[in-house]
Amino acid sequence: MGRSDRLFEVIQVLRGARKPLTAEALAERLEVNKRTIYRDIAALQGMRIPIAGEAGIGYVMRRGFDLPPLMFDADEVEAIVVGLALLQRTGDRGLQASATGVGAKIAEVLPPAIGCGVDRGALQVSKWGAPSAAIDMKAIRQAIREERKLRLGYRDAQERATRRTVKPIAIVYYIQSTVLAAWCELRGDFRHFRIDRIAACKALPERFPGQGAGLRKAWEVTQPKD
């Protein structure tokens, strides 16, 4: 969990608590150590979040505090509706499931007159698009974030099976296919792997920290310009 997400979670936990919570209780809830909680509380108090209490006694959120609502106009809501619906065409079941949750969360915090637009059926998107992946694409997205190597079982257009160790750097969502861009150790060059042809995918212990951005920049140079 990133620091900004953790700070948000601290606020949410304290808002829902019926009694003061100690740093130990917060640490256990968020799966961090007490020192991290002390730093987070100090940071939030520095942002003028009304948290009262101290170490050894517990912390409580003063009444009346609430997070500001998200504010979108009608056009922005419609952009969100279409954007989330377009995820149906990626073949990425993980993103499709997440899109449903995102839409529900946004609709919940928007004013009723605008938030109902998230569920409206006036804007329709065709479900036709890239074939669904046989693997869990969440593992690929996570490997890209963590700069972690992948071991792929792949079949090319001629149904020839190969095994590749790659450094994943990007996922490209085309209309008719979804492609993993990666540095292939077998070929010693950038290669594209259609997601629907990846039969197996395993994250490896080996990482390539600090190389991802540079590899993406070098890969982008090789791509045709529109």
Image (cartoon, rainbow, N blue to C red):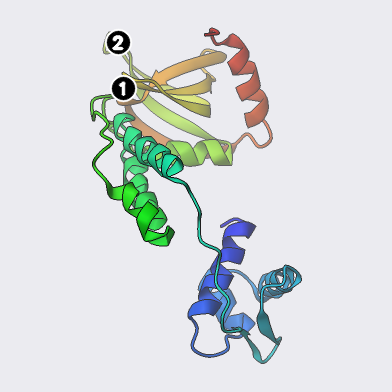
Q: Nearer the viewer, residue 178 or 67?
A: 67
Amino acid bearing label 1: Arg
Q: Neighbour class for label 1 at 10 Å: few (<14), some, many (≥20)?
A: some
User: Can residue 204 be spotted in the picture?
Assistant: no
Q: Are marks 1 and 2 in contact (CB under 8 Å)?
A: yes
Q: Neighbour class for label 2 at 10 Å: few (<14), some, many (≥20)?
A: few
Residue beneath the point at 26% across and 25% down: 131
**Which element is circle 1 on?**
helix
Residue beneath the point at 67% across and 85% down: 52
User: Can residue 201 be spotted in the picture?
Assistant: yes
Which image quarter: residue 156? top left
Q: Does residue 112 sit above or below 162 in this rendering?
A: below
Residue receiving disc 2: 157
Q: Position of residue 167 (x, y in %)?
A: 54, 28
Q: Nearer the viewer, residue 58 or 34?
A: 58
Residue receiving disc 1: 197
- Image quarter of the N terminus: bottom right
**Which element is circle 2 on?**
loop
Amino acid bearing label 2: Ala
Q: Does residue 178 sit above or below 121 in this rendering?
A: above
